[in-house]
Structure formats: structure tokens, C-alpha cells
Image (cartoon, rainbow, N blue to C red):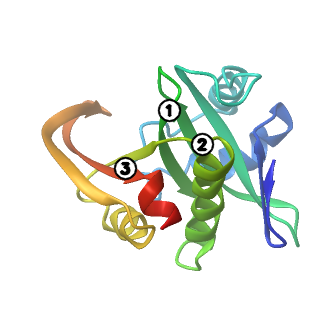
């Protein structure tokens, strides 16, 4: 668990399925996401695939973001622990009603700090659709830099979309 007085990040569990589904199934809010479930069973299968151990190479690990005062799940952070162990990829999804209030920034900040300062990761990347201006602003506010722009590199929902890669080094974060 990663926590502040305001937020708690913890592994997703089967008990989180309904809350997770409530914001992840919103197709408009999640139009840049690859996973937009239409049935609760899809969420159950997604949660069942979450590894039992954190920081395992070649795995995606899902954390839920909980607003402590209400004990409500307001979003999630996915972390791809890349083979070799020193790099990872990160992504964040936030429920519509909590967007634009700084929650994604604060949740990502404590997660990135944990990855660099506790797990001693060397580099963190993020993949984003170039049309997703809010996510790009978030990454840039967190001091990520644009490293690459791949044309029609991902097939999402039957459509080829561009992929922009942002990166951040530990030395840049702790400076």
C-alpha cells in the first residue's frame, strides 16, 4: 500500500469490481482507454489476472485509488513492470467526477515517488494517445518529457491510433 492522509493506493481486489466497473465502463470518459468493460464479468476477469505479487517483471499490476475520507474508489493506476526489473510503464484512470481536481496528479506523484525512491526504478514511461490532452498535461506537470511519437502504432477498438511515449528518469525526479 502507498498512502497519504488523503489517498490510499492498494492492489485491486474482487470486492472492488462494482466500483471499478462504475467508472471504467463509461465509454466517453474512457475513450482513450483500451479496456472499457461492458459487463461486470469482464471486470471480474480483469481483476483475476492481476498478479498476486507487486513488482514482478513482465506483469501489469493494478492499484485502486481510494479517497480516504469517503473510502471510495475514485480511479486506478496500472503499472507494467518491464522485463529486467529497472523500468516500468504507468497509466492512470480517474472517475469523471474526480477529474480536474488534482487527484490524478497526487496519486501519480506518490506512486512515482514509491517506484523511484522505494523500488529504485531507473526509468518510468507512459503511453498516451496524442489527442488525450488532459493526460499529456498531467504527464508534463509530473515532469515527464515527450520521447517519441509513433504513427498508427496501436490498434484500439478496431482503429489504428498514434502512440506518444513520455519518459522520466529517477535522477530527474529526485533532483
Residue topped by disc 1 = 86
Q: Nearer the viewer, residue 171 or 84?
A: 171
Q: Residue at x 57, y 66 (%)?
A: 104
Tag shown at residue 32: 3
Q: Is residue 23 visible?
A: no
Q: Real-space Cα distance between discs 3 and 2?
A: 30 Å
Quarter of the rendering containing residue 4:
bottom right
Rendering coords of residue 73 (x, y %): 76, 56
Rendering coords of residue 161 (x, y %): 20, 41
Quarter of the rendering containing residue 158:
top left
CA neighbours of label 2 inside 10 A, class few (<14), some (14 to 19), many (20+):
some
Rendering coords of residue 147 (x, y %): 22, 50
Find numbered disc 2 in the image and state the secondary structure of the residue it sits on.
loop
Q: Residue at x 57, y 54 (%)?
A: 112
Question: Is 32 placed left or right of 120 in the picture?
Answer: left
Residue topped by disc 2 = 120
Rendering coords of residue 45 (x, y %): 67, 22
Q: Residue furthest bottom?
A: 101
Q: Are marks 1 and 2 in contact (CB under 8 Å)?
A: yes
First-in-chain label (3 vs 1): 3
Question: Is 62 placed left or right of 12 in the picture?
Answer: left
Quarter of the rendering containing residue 101:
bottom right
Question: Is 81 placed left or right of 139 in the picture?
Answer: right
Amino acid at each position: 500500500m502507498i498512502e497519504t492522509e488523503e489517498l490510499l493506493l492498494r492492489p485491486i481486489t474482487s470486492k472492488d469490481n462494482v466500483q471499478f466497473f462504475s467508472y471504467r465502463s463509461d465509454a466517453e470518459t474512457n475513450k482513450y482507454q483500451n479496456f472499457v468493460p461492458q459487463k461486470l464479468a469482464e471486470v471480474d476477469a480483469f481483476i483475476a489476472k492481476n498478479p498476486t505479487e507487486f513488482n514482478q517483471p513482465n506483469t501489469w499490476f493494478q492499484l485502486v485509488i481510494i479517497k480516504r475520507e469517503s473510502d471510495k474508489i475514485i480511479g486506478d493506476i496500472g503499472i507494467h513492470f518491464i522485463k529486467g526489473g529497472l523500468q516500468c510503464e504507468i497509466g492512470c484512470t480517474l472517475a469523471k467526477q474526480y477529474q480536474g481536481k488534482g487527484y490524478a496528479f497526487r496519486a501519480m506523484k506518490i506512486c512515482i515517488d514509491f517506484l523511484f525512491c522505494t523500488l529504485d526504478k531507473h526509468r518510468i514511461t507512459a503511453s498516451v494517445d496524442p489527442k488525450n490532452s488532459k493526460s499529456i498535461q498531467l504527464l508534463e506537470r509530473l515532469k515527464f518529457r515527450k520521447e517519441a511519437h509513433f504513427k498508427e502504432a496501436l490498434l484500439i477498438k478496431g482503429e489504428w491510433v498514434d502512440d506518444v511515449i513520455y519518459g522520466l528518469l529517477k535522477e530527474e525526479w529526485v533532483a
